[in-house]
Image (tube, rainbow, N blue to C red):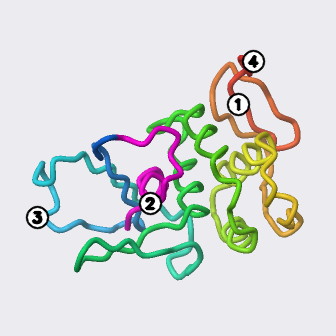
């Protein structure tokens, strides 16, 4: 399933739209095996495959369909794609890039965000998502009931030598503004 940064780019939410797709981010459950024909450089792109249990496998929240001629593939909707993208921060996706993309997501659907935050299994991802949404003053955030979102216990370090945010208990990069 296409997700994360790729799904956001295809829907026009990326901060910088590439002239040509060089990396495709795919997400699936742990243990997912890709077919042999899928591997290699047949498609002229690098596939970044993330096998994760970020959401329960039966969770139907946050999907759409991408169609190209007679071909269709299940794709993450922007709400889910942003959470998937944050799952890869700071390793494969930079904090600043994720923050810029989040700034483009003023029109997310609060009911979909609510359902995804309630089922998301990563405390780090949920806290980072909420931190960035609040920091960007995104209007849909006021319609999300945070009392239903489990933000876990303890602190999470997104980046070393950063600034600690006491509300979301995460260490983020120091503001350069």
Mark 3 / mark 1, whichever is N-terminal: 3
Task: Please identify the quadrant where the C terminus is shown.
Answer: top right
Q: Residue at the spot x=71%, y=54% of the render?
A: 106
Where is residue 6? Give x, y as percent.
41, 53
Return the residue at label 1. 172
Where is residue 84? Give x, y as percent.
53, 56
Of tags 2 and 4, the one toward the viewer is 4
Q: How many marks?
A: 4
Place residue 17 in its image quadrant.
top left
Neighbour class for label 2 at 10 Å: few (<14), some, many (≥20)?
A: many
Mark 3 / mark 2, whichever is N-terminal: 2
Q: CA distance from mark 1 to mark 2?
A: 24 Å
Residue toward you, 56 or 25: 25
Residues at circles 3 and 2 in contact by the CB criterion of under 8 Å: no
Q: Which mark is residue 177?
A: 4
Mark 2 / mark 4, whichever is N-terminal: 2
The secondary structure making up most of the magenta span is: loop
Return the residue at label 3. 37
Q: Residue at the spot x=57%, y=72% of the render?
A: 62
Residue toward you, 21 or 152: 21
Element marked by disc 1:
strand
Q: Residue at the spot x=32%, y=41% of the render?
A: 19
Residues at circles 3 and 4 in contact by the CB criterion of under 8 Å: no
Where is residue 147? Give x, y as percent.
89, 65
Q: CA distance from mark 3 to mark 4?
A: 47 Å
Residue extent of the magenta highlight: 1-18
Return the residue at label 2. 3
Residues at circles 1 and 2 in contact by the CB criterion of under 8 Å: no
- Placement of 2 over or under 13, stated as above or below: below
């Amino acid at each position: 399933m296409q997700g994360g940064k790729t799904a956001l780019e295809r829907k026009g939410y990326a901060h910088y739209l590439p002239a040509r797709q060089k990396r495709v981010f795919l997400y699936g459950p742990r243990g997912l095996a890709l077919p042999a024909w899928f591997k290699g450089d047949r498609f002229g792109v690098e596939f970044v495959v993330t096998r994760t249990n970020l959401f329960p496998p039966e969770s139907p929240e946050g999907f759409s369909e991408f169609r190209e001629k007679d071909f269709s593939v299940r794709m993450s909707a922007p709400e889910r794609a942003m959470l998937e993208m944050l799952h890869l921060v700071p390793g494969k996706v930079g904090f600043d890039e994720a923050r810029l993309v989040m700034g483009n997501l003023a029109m997310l659907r609060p009911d979909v965000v609510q359902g995804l935050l309630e089922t998301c299994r990563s405390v780090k991802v949920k806290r980072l998502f909420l931190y960035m949404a609040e920091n960007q003053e995104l209007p849909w955030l006021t319609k999300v009931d945070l009392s239903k979102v489990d933000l876990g216990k303890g602190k999470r370090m997104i980046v070393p030598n950063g600034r600690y945010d006491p509300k979301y208990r995460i260490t983020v990069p120091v503001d350069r503004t």
